[in-house]
Image (cartoon, grey):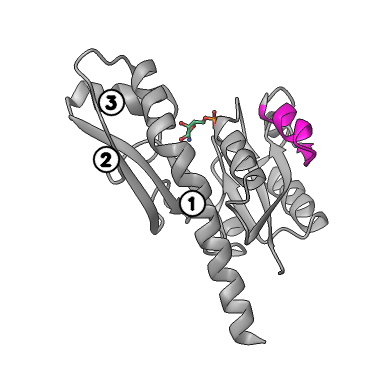
Amino acid sequence: MLKRRIAVLVSGGGTNLQALIDRQQAGDIPHGQLTVVIADNPQAYALQRGEKAGLAVAAIPRRQMSQEQFEGELQATLEKYDIEVIVLAGFLCILSANFLRKWQERVINIHPSLIPSFCGKGFYGLRVHQAALDYGVKVTGATVHFVNEIPDGGKIILQKAVAVLPDDTPETLQRRVMEEAEWQLLPQAVEMVCAKLCEEQADRE
Ligand code: GRF
């Protein structure tokens, strides 16, 4: 069976990447093939996780170049590896509308809240969980969605709710959202999207 070739874009620790690697190794992503891990900085620990799993890795140092240059190199790397699906897994750069136009319904992001709460520009990392605690919500969660030109604004693929506990700090809440939602949802959503692309291809043939 033909698998859709996946690039995972990362900026940091890469626990969501690790969840994808683990689920792939367990046979839970039969329609997708993790192929290359691309970081926007060479220090991202996620690159080491990718290497250890035998994936191709690339670093494109965003800080040293313009948006246009960065996206040009990104596009070239994606083409080099014949990529069909892009997963943003803790990737902190905003991709331009111009870039995303070429990848409609092919770019997936994981966000650590129930969109449309606590999302959009400026809501990343611990800030998302701090905002949920400041507001006093009793339930938060994670959302996997397609990426369009509006930050966290694309079509929702999967969501899962997670309880906020009375003594939570941003750190404890972040950890619970990852364990109970993100690490499960992202591999599931990736498989769903890849399976749908396989189906569409079979219909065309
Ligand atoms: C996760 O909370 C993800 O939802 C967010 O950034 C964090 C990345 O963590 N976008 P990791 O690099 O996957 O460990």
Label 2 crowd (10 A; few <14 / some 14-19 / many >=20)? some
Q: Amino acid at mark 2?
A: Ser
Q: Position of residue 83 (x, y in %)?
A: 72, 58
Relative to 39, is 196 on the left or the right?
left
**Which mark identifies residue 116?**
none
Label 1 crowd (10 A; few <14 / some 14-19 / many >=20)? some
Say which residue label 1 marks. Answer: 188
Image marks 3 and 1: residues in contact by CB distance under 8 Å = no
Residue occupying image coordinates x 61% and y 34%: 18
- Is residue 48 inside the magenta stretch? yes
Spatial distance from mark 3 to mark 1, Cα to Cα? 27 Å
Say which residue label 2 marks. Answer: 117
Q: Is residue 123 visible?
A: no
Q: Amino acid at mark 3?
A: Ala
Q: Position of residue 88 (x, y in %)?
A: 56, 44
Q: Is residue 109 visible?
A: yes
Q: Amino acid at mark 1?
A: Gln
Q: Secondary structure at mark 1?
A: helix
Residue occupying image coordinates x 31% and y 14%: 169
**Residues in magenta, as a range:** 46-58
Spatial distance from mark 1 to mark 2, Cα to Cα? 22 Å
Say which residue label 3 marks. Answer: 131
Spatial distance from mark 3 to mark 2, Cα to Cα? 9 Å
Viewport quadrant of the N terminus:
bottom right
Q: Residue furthest front?
A: 26
Relative to 144, is 77 on the left or the right?
right
